[in-house]
Amino acid sequence: MKESRREFLKKSTCALSMTALATQMHHMGMMSVLAQKMEEKEQPAQGGDNYKAIVLLYMSGGNDGNNMVIPVHNDASVSNYAAYAATRQAQGLAIAQGSLLPISVPRIGGLTYGLHPALGPVTGGINNGIHELWAQQKLAMVTNVGTLVAPMTKAQYQNNSVPKPYQLFSHSDQVAQSQTSVSSTQAFTGWGGRIADRMNQPNNPNGLIPMITSIAGAQLFTAGQTTLPMAIADANTSLANVLNPSGFNTTAASVARRNAMNQLRTIDLDNNYLAAASHVTDLAMEANNALQTFQEVTVTFPNTSIGRQLRQIARLIKKRTDLNVNRQVFYCQIGGFDTHNNQINNHTNLLSQFSQAARSFYDEMVVQGVSNDVTLFTLTDFNRTMNPAGSGATVGSDHAWGNHVFVMGGSVAGGDFYGMNTTNGTPFPTLVIGTAGPDDTNSGSGARGRWIPTTSVEQYCATIARWFGLPENELGSVFPNIGTFPQNNLGFMI
């Protein structure tokens, strides 16, 4: 019995991306994804209706959250500036209390905390940074987040009665776990990719590009089981060129290749393989054509790597209707946060780059009228040790654990801290190291101030996924360990 085209496609989607056709079309590694569209063409869908996008901004290397947000107050009942300074000031890693950008935290009785000064207006900046979005309630922070297999106390950490994350404190493993939401073992799909597996067809049935796009190369976060991501260059490359096949130019050899492929596509379209290859090529060209004309963004973005990445994402969002997409997932990345030495200047520069680019992105979403529909959020490998590494001008910090992350957008219930409470009854850890520090992993002279997370990556990311539209009954499929934790909605999304 002759196999139907639909059945053939189900069995050969991945194989298509490995044909000579794909190798001749440099940016068409997305072809195996586009092949799925042959099953999704029955009903036309208009892009941009009920649109939502989530943007993961990854701070690669392990951002020092201890210097990103700091208690300004000196209330002795909770974490305070005196505790912070006691560990970091003598060795030159403390940020001066008077330079911190104040934020009020209703969750902790309205006490004042402070953001790193690089998150506000800076010399040579093009905007005021993200700090003022806090008072506008468009910026929130989830505190003491990290990879976890299960909730854990200091005693449980020390007596090994609760499993620890696989290869804790290792860059590659903690990056993988934050991007897969699986901390007990190695995983090979990311939670962003698994969302796309479940949400692409019902939301983007005629989407001309995949639901999930990386502007920072291949990433585990974007890998799904049945869908593949699109990876494109940053804004230094025009959208009109990001999908252009590199194998087709005006040389004689290139013209011959194009003619041969076009001839192949006209031969015996009753042959399922040739029909599938032909249709995939048509869809790839259709996507390329849709990107040929686009309107440049309105807001000025900084000419930094993260600025160019976010600008390219903003361009794609602006093109959403022509691309027939109602849901999009994006990945971008800023590196350099592994600050074992020379941290003060390097960290200041990195936070400034992040803040300037993120603020430009938010302002552009406002101009486009989708600020309520687009949420940007951060993740990183892990925190840094509260106890510095070295001293003086070269002072730095080492690998730690629980950390603080930002969520930004018009649908964020901003201006507050979120997450599960630490031992002091607030979501912010007690900044005391060693035996007297209830949130530190270790006791005695070897303690460095590695905070045990009280909120898991799963809880944080599941809250975002719910807002994005992931059905309740799919949470466990995307976040397989979510049932281990007491809450799967932290309440920071409106």
Image (tube, rainbow, N blue to C red):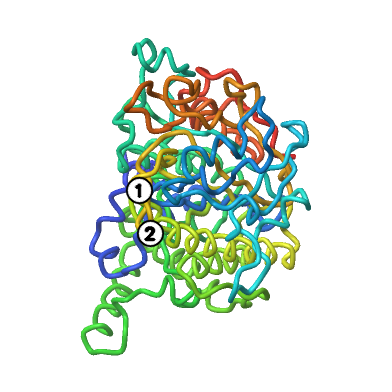
Quick one: 109 or 266, which is closer to the camera? 109
Quick one: 466 or 278, which is closer to the camera? 466
Residue under the point 61% across and 40% down: 81
Check disc 1 and report the residue beneath it.
Answer: 13
Image quadrant containing the N terminus: top left
Quick one: 350 or 217, which is closer to the camera? 350
Which element type, helix, strand or loop, lies under badge 1?
helix
Nearer to us of marks 2 and 1 is 2
Q: Is residue 2 above or below residue 442?
A: below
Tell how many labels.
2
Q: Is residue 113 above or below residue 246?
A: above
- x and y, in percent, of residue 200 in the image: 54, 46
Q: Is residue 270 left or right of residue 68?
A: left
**Residue type highlighted by circle 1:** Thr
- x and y, in percent, of residue 233 in the image: 42, 68
Check disc 2 and report the residue beneath it.
Answer: 393
C-alpha gap between disc 2 and disc 1: 55 Å
Quick one: 261 or 181, which is closer to the camera? 181
**Which sits earlier in the primary sequence, circle 2 or circle 1?**
1
Q: Categorize mark 2 by other alpha carbons within 10 Å: few (<14), some (14-19), many (20+).
A: some
- x and y, in percent, of residue 195 in the image: 51, 40
Res 131 quadrant in image: bottom right
Q: Is residue 484 above or below residue 347?
A: above
- x and y, in percent, of residue 55 in the image: 56, 52
Residue 418 in sight: yes
**Residue type highlighted by circle 2:** Ala
Given the current orientation, which residue lies at the most extreme left position? 253
Residue under the point 67% across and 61% down: 362
Q: Categorize mark 1 by other alpha carbons within 10 Å: few (<14), some (14-19), many (20+).
A: many
